[in-house]
Structure formats: C-alpha cells, structure tokens
Image (cartoon, rainbow, N blue to C red):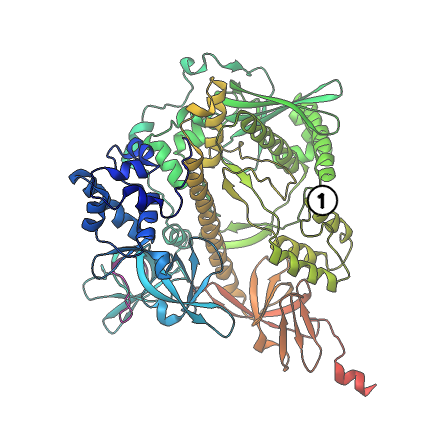
Amino acid sequence: MRECTRMPAGNLVIALGMKKKRNNWRRADPFVAREVQKYGTPAPSREFLLEYLDERGMPMTESELCQELGCDENESEAVARRLRAMARDGQLIRNRRDGFGVARRMDLIAGRVIGHPEGYGFVVPDEGGDDLFLSAREMRSVLHADRVLVRVAGVDRRGRREAALAEVLERKTESVVGRYFDRHGSGHVVADNRRIAQDIDIPPGYDNGARDGQIVQVDIVEQPTRRNRPVGRVVEVIGDHMAPGMEVEIAIRAHGIPVEWPQSVLEEIRDFGDSVPNSAEEGRVDLRDLPLVTIDGVTARDFDDAVYCERRGRNWRVIVAIADVSHYVQMGTALDREAELRGNSVYFPDRVVPMLPEVLSNGLCSLNPDVDRLCLACDMTVDSDGKLVRSRFVEGVMRSHARLTYDAVGAAIQDRDDRVRAELGELVAHLDRLYQLYQVLRDARERRGAMDFESQESVIEYGADGKIENIRPTERNDAHKLIEECMIAANVASARFLRRHKIPCLFRVHEGPSAAKLESLRVFLGELGLGLAGGDKPTPQDFAALLERVEERPDKHLIQTVLLKSLARAVYTPGDQGHFGLALPAYTHFTSPIRRYPDLLVHRAIRHVLRGGKAADFRYGVSNMEALGEQCSMTERRADEAVWDTIEWLKCEYMEDRVGEVFEGIVSSVVGFGLFVELKDVFVEGLVHITSLENDYYHFDPVGHRLTGERSGRVFRLGDPIRVRVVRVDLDDRKIDFEPVGQAQAKERRGRRGKRRR
C-alpha cells in the first residue's frame, strides 16, 4: 500500500477549519482508504486522531470530537470504539470528565510489568528505553505481565527512574498455577511463577476440594488492588506436590502452553489418512530414486529433513529435502491458527507438546523410510571452497531410503567402525561423500568467522517409578555437525531466494553486542591482557579470532562465557539484518516446519514464488510478518522458560537425596550476594551465599566477574574450580544451596597487609 505523508503540525486543524462540515475529516486523514479496506466502515485512523487531539491541546469527549470532525451516526460509533481501544493500548488516557487526551502529553508512559520474586518490579516501556523501577508498594496493584500507564515519580539512590502507577491498561494474568495452603480454614495459593510475588486468597467454598500442599490451577476472580491481594477460585486440582510428572504439568500450565486440540482442528484432520494420495503427487519432481536418508537422534519420532550428496567435477551437489507441511496446513484454517498460537513444539525431558497433531508430525509430514512423502527440496551446488554457487527449490515427492541415527553414522564415518559400515551396506559410500562435504563446509565456516561456542548439554534419565535416576552429558559427534552444516546451507539458500524475489518473510536475526555490553566486555578482556579487534563494530571474525587465541588458556571457560553473554538473543523479524553468530548476511529457518511456525511461513513464501506468485499478490505483508515475528519469538522464549523450569525442578528433586554430599564444581556466575556453582559430571547449579564464605568483607566486581575478600585478598572468579557440599534443597523455589569445602575453593592473592609484613 502506498505510504501517505504525515501532514505538518497544525495542518489537521487548519484543514478542517474548525468547521462543523460533514466528512471534513476524510480529506484530512491520509489513511482513510486503508481504514475502509480493513474495516469496511469508514472511521478516522488512529494516527489522525492522535495528531488531531495533540494539536487541539486539550482532552475532548467523544461527542465533542465527533461534532468537530463532522461524523455521522455510524462514524461516531466507530470513533467511540476506536477511542476506547486507544485508551486500552495506552495511546490515550480518559479523564474523570470522560475527555480523551494524548497520554504522552500527560507525561505518562505505557509499558509492560516485569515482576520480581522479592516483591518489586519494573516497567518495560512500549517505546523502548530504560526500564522504570516499581516499588513493592506500587506492585501491590498489579501482577507480572500487566500493561500499565505510569509517570516518573523520581530517581532512586541507584540512579533508576522510579515509576508511580497511573492506570492499569490490561490485565494479563487470568489463571495461575501454584501450591494450595490451608491455614485454619483460610486458603491461599503461592504461584509457581516466581515473578508473581502476591499470594492469591481462596475464599471459603472456592477451594474445589483442594487439600493442603496440593498443586492447583486457579482462575483470578478479583485482581489485586493497593489494599487487597488477588482473589481466586480453584478450577482444577492437578495433583500432589511430588507426584511423578508433576513438574511438566506445572510448567505447561504456568507458561500457558496449549496442549488440547480444539474441536475445529480435530475435524479438519479427520480425513487426512496415513498415506499420500496420488493426486497430491501430480506435477511434482520425482525424487524417489535418490538415496535420501534421515539422520536423527535415537529417540526422535518426527523426521522432517533428509539429505543427499554427490560429486560433480570439483563441485558438490547437495539436496536437503524437507517435509512439505505447507501442503497440509493451509493458510487461515483452524489447523493454521492453532500452529501459529503454539509457535513451536516444546520438548520436555519426558514428552513433547507438538505444534502439529500427530497425524502430521509423526505421520504424513514425517519422512519415514520406504513410504512416499511430499517435500520441498533445496537443490544446491557447493564449490570446493564450501561456497554456495547456486540453488533452486522444487516441490517434490520423495522416499527416504533409511532412518539413520547420529550414533550409527558417527561410528561409520568418524570412527570407521567396520561392523557398522558393513551393516549400512551401499549407503556407506553416500555417507562418506556427505562427510567429505561436511569438512568442506566446516572449513568455509571457520574462514568466514562463524563462532563456535562449546556448550555441554545434559540428558535426564528416568527410573521405573518415574523419578529422575541420572543426569548424563550428551555426546555430539561429527554426524550432528554434518547435518547442522547441511541445514545451515539450506537456510542460507532460502534467505537468498526470498531476498531475490522480495517476498516478505521471517528472517532469523542475531545481532552483535550493544555499545554498553561491548564496553564492559573490553574492560573485562583488558584485565586479562586480551583485546577484541574491530573498534566500535567488531565482526564475527573478531570474536572467532579471540576464541581461537584463548583455546589453550586455563580460563577459556570464563572468557567464552563472558563473550556469549555479551551477544543478543536471536529473534524472528522481517528485517534481514543478518546472523552475527554464524557470520551470515541473511538467514532464515527453512528446515523444520513440523516443529517451528517460522519455517512453515518460509515454505509458503517459497511455494508462492514457485507457483508464479509475486510480492504484490502474496497474502502476507511486512506488517503481518512483524506481528508473526513477535509471536514466534515469544513462543520460543516461552518454550525455553517452560523447559528450563522443568529441568530445574527435576535437578532439585535429584539433589534432595544428596544433601550433605561433597562435589567438585566450577563457578558458573558471580553476583553481589555470592557464587553460582555448577557441579561437574552432574550439571546441577546451586548458590554459595556470600555468608558461607570465609569470614571477611567481600566486594563484588561486575566487570571482572569476581568477589574479592577485603582482609584476606581471596578471589572467587567466574570459571574457578571449587569444592562444595550440598546443604539445602528448596523444591518450591527451585534453589540449591552449597557451602565451600576446604581451601581449594578460590585463588589466593596477597592483600595489602601481607605486603606490609614483608
């Protein structure tokens, strides 16, 4: 749609001439055509109303505004609805005389509340900028995630802007999961979400039969006020506190992860069946004779990518075939709406909450061996330097020739295990070519400066009673890395394809460090005698070069951790700002449409082009993609937080029987109140509180990531080895407390007194 030029200040009022002439606003509002197309009923746009009220310089009632604008009866109703919506969104404020004024003219700031377990909170402004501090007193009236209007009330002694609550725009917490407590007939629920610090009162008759200590789900029937705590009604008793599987049930409900399929979705998938009909294969490229194979983990049940590789002179031809989810999940259907709502599959230690129903995720859209499947294939040519020379996309039909595991492929190509190679038979030559291609792609990755942070993930193993039995490290071999490099190549090809055709889509964007984080990083590195090249704009190559320089240093873990923390979190957005960590100018997610909605959107965009479509007739615009990018980034964070909460619960449960035991660990974080320590070989993190350290006054250095004893000169620093004893486990708060054991917990450094004695 054509962009309209904003009218200079004062021109709206002049254009209307302050006359009561009907429909004058139509000539002055540059967005009227958009509003008619979007809503049918013509009404002044938000932009127009904001600017008009701003220029009038005073609040106006609905009737006053409609009279000045010359609105008829239908238009007046539309204006009234829009004014109320703008007030809900914090653009306008409604005063006690029913006048609507511009919020920013009243020095009010709209934002989202972030609660803290200690009772205070922060407001994240909608328009960006520094957060505002909300005292515990102000937090009494709101809950975590509420949208509010606040005014700046002052600056505290730490230099933070303090906020005073003006109005609650939107209540976001309608349901809470937590533990029910009954004290002499008076019930209350302590929320599992630690950002909700207020207890929820449960009046007599609202407990739904819950017993003391049980886990329940509560609907909020009265929101908190300055004088009263929130009031709730128990709608479901989930179970006993320590019941097996309870941790996942709590996480699912606490984070609002959709689990049940709506009836409309069940009706849509009823006729899908378990095989691809012949009619669906018509017009597609036949890839069934190519020895495409899937390579996944032993426990994987959904296979959405298959690979094939052959040598062509000095170049490589590599095909990455991805399940064609977009064929089955049509835009605008109930199935599509549910997939968008979920955003992604969520992988808990003992189960998966899928983005798509099982008939698709484990059936028609899973590239199971020896069955026909529809696919969208990326056919690439890679030269001997690992550079992507050309690529094309085709709608195909394929047949996986084998379901392989990382362990088996790693044994065959990396360990050269004769027994495994014999079992794989004719596929060995194909896998060897893939391994050769991987080495070429890996060399190219290193040359372009992609960062390769070493991280150790763990797997939780359960016993027959459903309780956690063991925590072991995952082993990542070259088969994992081979598939990763093939997927990255296909993602790069899809980004190039969509940029070339100028089709709106979601890019995977990973930005470099902010100016503030970069400054702190340089100070930290300077204390270690290190430097980061690149000036104010360091490149991925600069980061990679630094990682290479510290490879043999004993404090490598410390340096790598600080580097990683300096980088932003990757997000989905229609702007192609590139992927800093992978050192790529443009990057999308194309390879997992079964479990990620952004990948499904990329598939739709590619199919649109393959079928002759142009950017102008694509049903998604940039504004649609912006909203979808925010939604998908949110669901990704939601899934990460839910899984993290579950794993923390399980690790606490695992450590309950180990109170008093001694473990070797490493300092994983340093804060003002102590040290977080990760136990070796157990991958459990706990806190050594500053009061548990040797009698001394300890001073926190946030730049150097260390605590230093004033008298002893003892230094505790990120990455230091430390021996600790487990002293307490709090399952409700998911906290584990350690205390240091012996003298190996820190590095010695002579203090000033010691120097004077010499």
Q: Is any atom of residue 692 visible in this view? A: yes
> Which x, y percent locates residue 294?
57, 28
Viewport quadrant of the C terminus: bottom right
Q: Is any atom of residue 417 visible in this view? A: no
Residue bearing mark 1: 541
> Which x, y percent locates residue 90?
33, 54
Q: Which one is nearer the viewer's eye here, 142 or 424? A: 142
Viewport quadrant of the N terminus: top left
Q: Is residue 624 left or right of residue 495?
A: left
> Residue flagged by tag 1: what amino acid is it?
Gln
| Residues rendered magenta in the picture | 215-229
Q: Which one is nearer the viewer's eye here, 680 or 175? A: 175
**Measuring 69% from the left and 83% from the top, which residue is drawn there?**
711
> Which x, y percent locates residue 379?
60, 21
Q: Which one is nearer the viewer's eye here, 648 or 519? A: 519
Characterize the local packing of mark 1: few (<14), some (14-19) or many (20 or more) Cα atoms within 10 angstroms: many
